[in-house]
């Protein structure tokens, strides 16, 4: 689903990435995959990081999903968010360790 109200069709993906985070909380990491047309954002697995992901999800109208996994050899939940922003596919994620989950 494309973020509404944003005209981004003809922009290069690096400009799309800059526009995506311009007025939003900054991710811990941001990767651009030119050939795949994908932007990947990593957030911390704490309350602040998940709140930031929720803001992106609210803007795009998409939910955050969770999946049990291992992170550094410990049980964790991988929180994911996927949406379209202009011509780019955006993926955001955060790992919440099981002992930090509430």
Image (cartoon, rainbow, N blue to C red):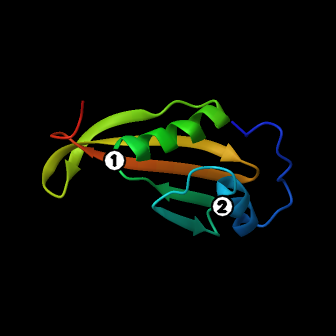
82 vs 25: above or below: above
Q: Nearer the viewer, residue 56 or 67?
A: 56
Disc 1 is placed on an element classified as loop
| Residue at 23% across, 35% down | 101
| Dot 1 crowding, Cα within 10 Å, few <14, some 14–19, many 20+ | many
Query: Which of the marked residues, 1 or 2, is nearer the chain's N terminus?
Result: 2
Mark identifier at residue 45: 1
| Dot 2 crowding, Cα within 10 Å, few <14, some 14–19, many 20+ | some
Q: Position of residue 68 (x, y in %)?
A: 25, 37
Q: Position of residue 12 (x, y in %)?
A: 78, 67
Q: Position of residue 11 (x, y in %)?
A: 82, 62
Q: Position of residue 69 (x, y in %)?
A: 23, 44
Count how many numbered circles sit on residues in the image: 2
| Residue at 50% across, 44% down | 52
Q: Nearer the viewer, residue 94 or 24?
A: 24
How far is disc 1 from disc 2 in space, using C-alphas?
26 Å
Quick check: 22 left or right of 51? right
Disc 2 is placed on an element classified as loop
Quarter of the image where the C terminus is located? top left
Q: Nearer the viewer, residue 51 or 91?
A: 51
Residue 1 placement: quadrant: top right
Q: Are marks 1 and 2 in contact (CB under 8 Å)?
A: no
| Residue at 64% across, 30% down | 61
Residue 79 placement: quadrant: top left
Which residue is disc 2 drawn over?
Answer: 37
């Amino acid at each position: 689903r494309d973020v509404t109200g944003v005209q981004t069709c003809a922009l290069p993906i690096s400009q799309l990435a800059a526009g995506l985070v311009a007025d939003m909380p900054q991710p811990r990491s941001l990767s651009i995959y030119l050939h795949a047309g994908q932007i990947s954002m990593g957030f911390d697995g704490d309350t602040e990081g998940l709140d930031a992901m929720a803001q992106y999800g609210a803007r795009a109208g998409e939910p955050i999903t969770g999946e049990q996994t291992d992170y550094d050899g410990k049980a964790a939940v991988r929180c994911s968010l996927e949406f379209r922003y202009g011509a780019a596919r955006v993926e955001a994620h955060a790992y919440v360790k099981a002992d930090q989950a509430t």
